[in-house]
Amino acid sequence: MLGFLTLNKPTGVTSFSLVRKLRKLTGEKRVGFAGTLDPFAQGVLIFAIGRAYTRQLDHFHTLPKTYRFTWVLGIETTTLDPEGPITHQEPFAGDLTQLHDILPQFTGTISQLPPIFSAKKINGKPAYLSARKGEVPELKPVDVTIEALELLNVTPGEFPQIEMRMTCSKGTYVRSMVRDLAVALGSVGYCKTLIRESVGHHTLDTAMHPETLTPETLPEVLTHEP
């Protein structure tokens, strides 16, 4: 049972817990995936089972990814997602119509600072290890490419909720995009929900739910070309 597998990772599940599940199902120790999804996120996650396939995971890293996400204006958390404690909270008093005006500055090739709670490596160690100790890791901005940034829905109020879709290159953090959009509006924000809708041509429509996997069903859904 070797090959590639596209799963729809549920919320509340870590990417690495699915690695353990696949190792148990297949008896294969070499299991990897392309592009971690945070526990609060869900969506397309591509796995490789077996040495011949894990060696090809870099191909998936180069593919564009599309995310649908909802973020909240006026509230900031340590992790920029629902899992961290709130660090700042102030009702948004700005102009929501400015959202349309600022989107062009966040498309194309932009410089983006990764969140301190991220797997970005500093001296070989993930930044989140330092952040968990209360330290502020010194991360450097990286250039990423935003192919499309679309405003889907706005729910006004003291703390507006904004739904968007973004297609981007590898290395892009949705949480950083939310932070920077909020700052451009004179406020703070955090990412409330996040769904990875696609990685290249791999979409939610073809992704399997982990609970449906058994030793009998797994061979039927494995593929052998990236």
Image (cartoon, helix red, strand yellow):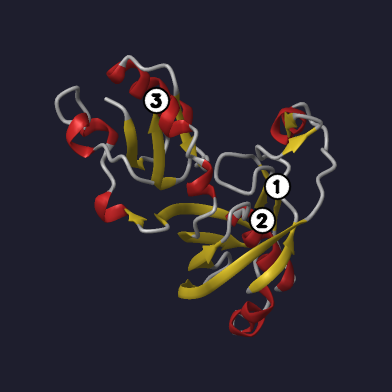
Secondary structure category for the residue under label 3:
loop
The 10 Å Cα crowd at callout 3, few under 14, some 14 to 19, many 20 or more, is: some
Q: Nearer the viewer, residue 91 or 162?
A: 162
- Report which residue position mark 1 lands on: 115
- Give whichever of discs 2 and 3 has the lower sequence position: 3
Against 72, residue 24 (above or below) is: above
Q: Are marks 2 and 1 in contact (CB under 8 Å)?
A: yes
171 relative position to 164: left or right: right
The quarter in which the N terminus is drawn is: top left
| Location of residue 10 by image quarter | top left
Q: What amino acid type should be assigned to the residue bearing mark 1? A: Pro
Q: What amino acid type should be assigned to the residue bearing mark 2? A: Ser
122 relative position to 179: left or right: right
Residue that appears at 34% across and 45% down: 225
- Give whichever of discs 2 and 1 has the lower sequence position: 1
Q: Are marks 2 and 3 in contact (CB under 8 Å)?
A: no
Q: Which mark is residue 176?
A: 2
200 relative position to 99: left or right: left
The 10 Å Cα crowd at callout 2, few under 14, some 14 to 19, many 20 or more, is: some
